[in-house]
Amino acid sequence: MTSIIKKAFLFYLLFLFVTFSGNPIQATESSPLEGDLAFQQMKEQIIRENNSVEQPVEQKKQQNGTVKLTAEQKIEQKVLTIQSSSSLKEQQVIETPLGITPALIEIPALDARAEVIEVGQTADGNMAAPEDIHTIGWYNLGAKPGNNGNAVLAGHVDGFTGPGTFYNLKELEPDDKIHITGTDGTELTFIVVDKQSYPPEDAPLNEIFGNSSTPQLNLITCTGTFNTAIGHYEERLVVYTELVEN
């Protein structure tokens, strides 16, 4: 029971203190990615780095010269290939390693794209938020995008000089797509299923941060009226998305 209470309290702090201080003064004001070209270059670099794998020895041998096989050797090779393929499929079904460490996010409906960084907890136990209003934070103590559970990405709505990456998040509608590229070059696509705004004290924490039997991705930012007396936005916007099966 104590563990459940502690977990619920952690989620509550997480929800209150991420980008969700709601205070644009806390965010730095660096420039967003320099257009589509810069973003595409970053994406291609991630994919290129993960494709730089040395060729297998057998593949090199085949490229360096033709090897003649007897009929028996060809049959044996075919059997081994089939067995290897079957074993690989069984392993994939058992392990289902879908979860990725997010590196980039693209939201075509908003013409928005940004780098994603890992954020954990601050020294006092709160969730750390990205300093840059054009950078998105993934809570690395929660679920990975693609794994069963609720993965959470958070971004600032604005800052001193202008809007942040998630400024137009409220414009998303059901079936809009969210593309997440992992550090290994894998790309997963999620679709919007719902969006809701809550006062922080009324937020359904289990729906946002809790367990799930399917892969979910929730995007969070501030919304509503900015209360100058307390220096915070009065509501939190949550966009709920689910993984599109390949």
Image: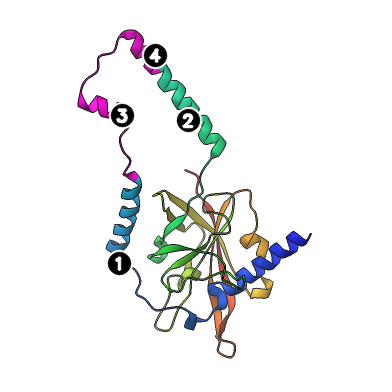
Lower position in the chain sequence, tag 2 or tag 3: 3
The disc placed on residue 76 is: 4
Which is in the foreground here, disc 2 or disc 3? 3
In the displayed image of the protein, which residue is found farthest to the front? 123
In the displayed structure, 8 sits above or below 226; it is above
The Cα atoms of the two marked residues, 2 and 1, are separated by 40 Å
Lower position in the chain sequence, tag 1 or tag 3: 1
Lower position in the chain sequence, tag 2 or tag 1: 1
Residue appearing at x 54%, y 79% in the figure: 22
The Cα atoms of the two marked residues, 4 and 3, are separated by 19 Å
Q: Nearer the viewer, residue 197 or 44?
A: 44
Q: Which residue is mark 1?
A: 35
Q: Which residue is mark 3?
A: 57
In the displayed image of the protein, which residue is found farthest to the bottom? 229
Highlighted range, magenta: 51-78
Q: Nearer the viewer, residue 123 or 30?
A: 123
The Cα atoms of the two marked residues, 1 and 3, are separated by 41 Å
Q: What percent of the width, then of the height, locates residue 221?
A: 53, 71
Which is in the foreground here, disc 1 or disc 4? 4
In the displayed structure, 157 sits above or below 185; it is below
**Amino acid on which disc 3 is placed:** Val
Task: Name the main secondary structure of what is drawn in magenta.
Answer: helix
Circle 1: element type: helix
The disc placed on residue 210 is: none
